[in-house]
Image: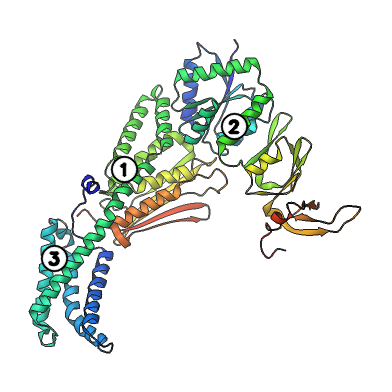
Amino acid sequence: MRELRIFIADDEAPARGRLKELLADIGGELATHVVGESDNGLDVIDRLPGSGAQVLLLDIQMPGMGGIELARHLCVVEDAPAVIFVTAHDRHAVEAFELNALDYLMKPVRAERLAAALRKCAVAVAAGRDARGVHEQARRLERAAGAPREFFSVAERNRIVLVPVGEVLFLKAELKYVTLHTGAGEHLIEEPLVSIEREFGERFVRVHRNCLVAREAIRGFERVADSGGDEPHWSVVLEGVAERLPVSRRLWPAVKGVLPEGKA
Amino acid sequence: MSSIRQNPFPEALPDFRNLGVTARVLIGVNLLALLAILLSEPGWGNVLNTYVMAASMFEPPLLASLALFYVGAPWLLRLPYWRGCALVITVALTAAAATHALLGAFAPVGLARMLVLTALASALMLAYLRLHMRAYSPALGEARLQALQARIRPHFLFNSLNAVLSLIRHDPRRAERTLEDLADLFRALMSDGRSLVRLADEINLIERYAAIEQLRLGDRLRMSWDLDSAPMDAMLPALVLQPLLENAVYHGVEPGTGVGDILVRVERRGNRVLVRIENPWLQPGTQTRAGNHMALDNIRERLMLFFDDEARLDARVEGTRYQVDIDIPYRGRA
């Protein structure tokens, strides 16, 4: 069998060194090759997709971006590596993984456990991973995370582009995609609006069956008189957005309460 | 009560150098006098006059006794509790008798009555202060437990062990040193959090702790120490500085992507000991970590238990830095 290509992400240099020692120790049984290492989450997002890594050994507590959110963003690219979490102690995550039988290792890591986890990955890599599995993993990670992400991720030419959640003014569902609108542009993501609403309920409010808007961006509401057969309805005015987004009649009572006092 | 037996309450006189104790005694005695006068004077008009009259008799012995207790506090504290109480009452009685001898002509009551009142007031105040300390005693045990739980961050323990493992093959000597540091740290963590320790020991402890963090975090952690004017013989509750430094690393350095500067400064100013621990303030949103307030509250509570109202702990964000300041009275070894 060919060497398994491995990427190590951990913010502590001694911890990365220890993993490399262990990989060398089990080399006789399972040949591996470290194709990259990184000490922060955002850097991993940048460098991992081009590295050709098949397995990512990923610390959960990392600066820049924590391991769990990172793993969720990896799910958007094709041929994402298999992820093995390596954690010192993250009780909640560990519980979640136990329930979902995801791979994780506890620091300090034992050579036999590392070898066993890598063998599983090697089998998965040889079999090829199906897309359904990736989405399933993303869903489990969402449950394990317990907190909203800080970024949306978009796959562009097999790179991962991160869009900070704070920059998104509104999201519109169209067919099977959701379009993120920021002040600077638009991005397509492949996530249902419902799950975004569930995750970011604090930040975005639903104004229409197909539309969420950032509460902070709301500047006011306009009454649109009936024109060309449309019924008269309210629409929402957003900071820095020329487009007026219609508010559905059913949601209007909830939406009109969002505007802070004195901004009518 | 079994909980008291398991957690024996140290019987000790109140610390008469503590401002809180002195204030409680002054207010307490004056309230007792006022109460007695309100009970005996039927009309409102005479209350103030009588109070001033009485005050001229009881304030001099009260203040004189408190001054004597202040001076003799280190010595008083070493006496067994009951003998100490007897001494305190004797001193108060002597002061009262002396006052009566000097101002007897104006005295509204005879010597015998004055001595009885003094003995009763002293006994009441001692009982009150004892109850006050008792009330804090379970809190003390609990605070210690919380301190233990808050201190041993499993995250830190396992990452440190992992770091030691990484050293064993190529730098066995440093691995040994790190294990020794870990052992010292855990010995301190598991010791009785109710005791006072010398500042020198607490500083030694946080230096060892910092050495372990330095190994894990490498260049990302930059420690500056400003300890030149630290009063090494000052006494403070155990494990006050270490959790603050641990917080500084956990919240200010680990979640950041750059280099994190931590400053530890301890100095003596007059009869105060000032401590500042400062770390970078990372904007919330970039991986905020919870649990800071529990540690701060716990430390504040323990400082209060030892120093009453004379201790202060403040935490604030100042520009890009997060600062924790502690201000406690300077007490040399008693």
Q: Residue at x 67, y 41 (%)?
A: A196
The residue indicated by pointer 2 is A140
Q: Position of residue B291 (x, y in %)?
A: 45, 46
Look at the picture and state if B294 lies above or below A76.
Answer: below
Which element is circle 1 on? Answer: helix
Q: CA distance from mark 3 to mark 2?
A: 69 Å
The quadrant of the picture occupied by the C terminus of chain B is bottom left
The residue indicated by pointer 3 is B88
Instruction: Using a 10 Å C-alpha cutoff, classify the residue at mark 2 as few (fewer than 14 neighbours), some (14 to 19) or many (20 or more).
Output: some
Q: Amino acid at mark 2?
A: Arg
Q: Position of residue B216 (x, y in %)?
A: 44, 34
Instruction: Using a 10 Å C-alpha cutoff, classify the residue at mark 1 as few (fewer than 14 neighbours), some (14 to 19) or many (20 or more).
Output: some
Q: Position of residue B225 (x, y in %)?
A: 39, 47
Which element is circle 2 on? Answer: helix
Q: Residue at x 21, y 60 (%)?
A: B130
Look at the picture and state if A194 lies above or below B309.
Answer: above
Q: Amino acid at mark 1?
A: Asn
Q: Is B248 on the left or on the right of A39, as rendered?
A: left
Outermost residue on the bottom side: it is B45
Which quarter of the picture shows residue A141?
top right
> Which numbered circle lies on residue B204?
1
